[in-house]
Image (tube, helix red, strand yellow):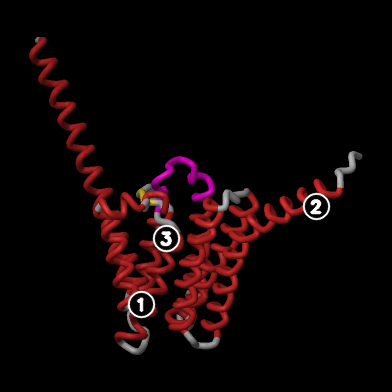
Amino acid sequence: MAILPSGEGVTYAKIQDVNRLRYAVPNAITMASLVLGILAIQDAFGGQYAASAYLIVFASVVDTFDGLAARLLHATSPFGKYLDTLCDAVTVGVAPGVLVYAVYFKDWAAGGLIAAGWTAAVLARLAYFQATEARDRLYFIGLPSPPAADILVGFVLLSSRVWHHYPYPWLVFALMVVLSFLMLSKIRVEKGAFFTPERIVRTWRGRAFLLALVFTAVLPWAAPFVVFSTMLILVIARELLIRVRRSGDRAAARIGEVNSVAADD
């Protein structure tokens, strides 16, 4: 085995330490989101429902920074991707399921199954994401699980501030069903790569993003539900408009073909 001179050995060791630190930063951020998710579960069991909801939202926000840090530091790795998926399973899968069970479905005969259904839907979404993430650089296929969880727990926050209790369990159940369907659907949702400085300034999506930040700063208790629900409505409206246009184009093409055949006859 070749032995490096002492000076070169020290330099090589320093480079290795820097590389390890570079990869450790995004993974540490991912683990921080996991810790927040676990704390949210503990608060849900302890009856601190609003605090639990805030922790879940904060965990989903922190989770966005691990990918950003990995790209900035050129520290993406298969280990980091799998770790992120496993942590998401807890923070936006298990934790919201436990929270809505404790708040809305604890007295229902099938309450445990309903809560478990949310977690199962998120796990299916995460597996679906792993299979489809490379298809498009700018768009997710299907609604990502973090904003879906933010909408769900955002309703808990909204209820705690507006009504000071937690009404409408059937509405929450319907919301869980719709969000679960959208997580496994074919709708396209912008990835973080879409929001470059130029796009933020020059596109309506970017301006809406800036407006959402302002709204969050003013009304943090209402922002998760209002902001992400609005985003979801805009995404669905865009997809419906695209499908209507495609149907119109196909109908126009068929009419053109019929007219062409009639003219030839």
- Residue at image location 43% in from the left, 57% down from the top: 144
Q: Is residue 67 above or below residue 217?
A: above
Amino acid found under the numbered disc labelled 1:
Pro
In three-dimensional space, the C-alpha distance between marks 1 and 3, rounded to whole angstroms, equals 25 Å
In three-dimensional space, the C-alpha distance between marks 3 and 2, rounded to whole angstroms, equals 53 Å
Of callouts 1 and 3, the N-terminal one: 3
Secondary structure of residue under mark 2: helix
In the rendered structure, find residue 180 and report the number of the disc placed on it: 3
- Residue 138 highlighted magenta (yes or no): yes
Mark 1 vs 3: CB contact within 8 A: no
The one nearer the camera, 85 or 98, is 85
The one nearer the camera, 107 or 195, is 195
Q: Position of residue 89 (x, y in %)?
A: 55, 63
- Residue at image location 31% in from the left, 50% down from the top: 199
Residue 109 at least partly seen: no
Q: Is residue 68 above or below residue 171?
A: above
- Residue at image location 63% in from the left, 56% down from the top: 22
Which quadrant of the figure contains the C terminus? top left
Which residue corresponds to mark 1? 220
Mark in the foreground, 3 or 2: 2
Q: Position of residue 176 (x, y in %)?
A: 40, 67
Quarter residue 230 falls in: bottom left
Amino acid found under the numbered disc labelled 2:
Val
Secondary structure of residue under mark 3: helix
Which residue corresponds to mark 2? 10
Q: Is residue 129 above or below residue 224?
A: above
Secondary structure of residue under mark 1: loop
Mark 3 vs 2: CB contact within 8 A: no
Q: What segment is highlighted magenta in the picture? A: 127-142
- Residue 203 highlighted magenta (yes or no): no
Which quadrant of the figure contains the N terminus? top right
Mark in the foreground, 1 or 3: 1
